[in-house]
Image (tube, rainbow, N blue to C red):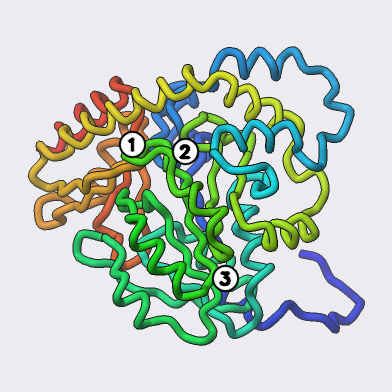
Amino acid sequence: MYTYSSPRLVTVRPEMDRLDQYAPGESLEAFSARTGIPLGDIIKLNSNESPYEPAPSVLKALSNFSSYNHYPDANSAALRSALATYAGVEEHHIVVHHGSSELINLLWHLFLSVGDNVLCCPPTFSLYTSVTSFCGAHVLEVSRKENYEVDIDAVLTALTPQTKLIVLTSPNNPTGNAISEQDILTLLDTGRIVILDEAYVEFSDRPRGFAHLVPQYENLVVMRTFSKWAGLAGLRIGYALMPDWIQAYMRRAQCPFEVNIAGHIAAIETLKALDYTLNDVRRIVEERERLFAMLSRYSFFTPFPSQGNFILTRVDESQVKVNEIRSAVEKQGILLRYFSQPAMRNFIRVTVGKPEHTDNIDKALHTLL
């Protein structure tokens, strides 16, 4: 315990008292320390990471590069050029950042003042709420329909003059469903900034997403990441597609060298090795259907169809408790995602892994029968 002799005359902003810390999925290291299971024996299916390593050419390029003593290109010119080809938009619409979470942080600070609100539709990515509170703004929650589709009429009714951002993830995390183009166009007509988080778009029925709308609308931002489909979660590379006027403010607000040089190399090489990486995406989509079928065989599960690399399932706790399932799978070294929010406590989200991972989950669940 430290004893300070100087007076403390400055405090944090009062809205910090209602700031909820974002809780990411438990790490391999933390799970190993808690359970005693060696790192190499853990099946990590709680953070929607790819079960596959990056393409060999990506790993080779990282290994062969030696100039890590120099800063990366602050303009990310080569990466933005490659992304323009991949996403189908011109370079001036693209902003690259250190993961999409940092894009969220920057975009929120650009648009929000104390007292504003951000409209979102839970259950969804909880970081939106944390960053909104950090900006001194409020979250305006609009419930989804029973099948977790966005209730567009309810969204339109809920809008207030203080609503600056409408935020939707498509496919949505954790429910896995995607939004239609017509619904997006309806929301764009409100004049608010519509932020569409496409972190999981490569796994969806529409893998090209809605990038094509960005040059047509002054109030659409599409966010994407290399963390999920490309197996680069550890390098933290995100990018956003946006109209020129927002891009100009983002570039002014960004700190220099936001994406490290290893991230630049890995992302560029991934886009060169698209066939290899997209084949891994196809394998994940195929295994997603097999995982869904396996979960459906258990009477205590109600899994929801997903267009992401994960499946959300409701647990009938009159048959088995979530904690019992957690205990059973953790004995097998399997790490899944659980929820603390009251409305989600009887749900589990399972990241799609390799076929043997699905088999191991099935084996663990059999011990509960």
Residue depicted at 88% across the width and 81% down the height: 7
For marks 2 and 1, give the CA distance.
9 Å
Can I make out residue 173 in this image? no
Q: Residue furthest front?
A: 216
Mark 1 sits on what residue?
Answer: 330
**Relative height, residue 351 to residue 244 (above, below):** above
Q: Earlier in the sequence, mark 2 or mark 3?
A: 2
Label 1 environment density (alpha carbons within 10 Å; few <14, some 14–19, many ≥20):
some
Mark 2 sits on what residue?
Answer: 31
**Relative height, residue 106 to residue 231 (above, below):** below
Q: Residue 155: percent from the left, percent from the top?
A: 36, 75
**Tags 2 and 1 touching, CB below 8 Å:** yes
Q: Quadrant of the C terminus?
A: top left
Label 3 environment density (alpha carbons within 10 Å; few <14, some 14–19, many ≥20):
many
Q: Residue 361: percent from the left, percent from the top?
A: 25, 31
Q: Which mark is residue 94?
A: none
Mark 3 sits on what residue?
Answer: 132
Residue depicted at 55% across the width and 42% down the height: 225
SS for dot 3: helix
Q: Nearer the viewer, residue 39 or 54?
A: 54
Which mark lies nearer to you, 2 or 3? Answer: 3
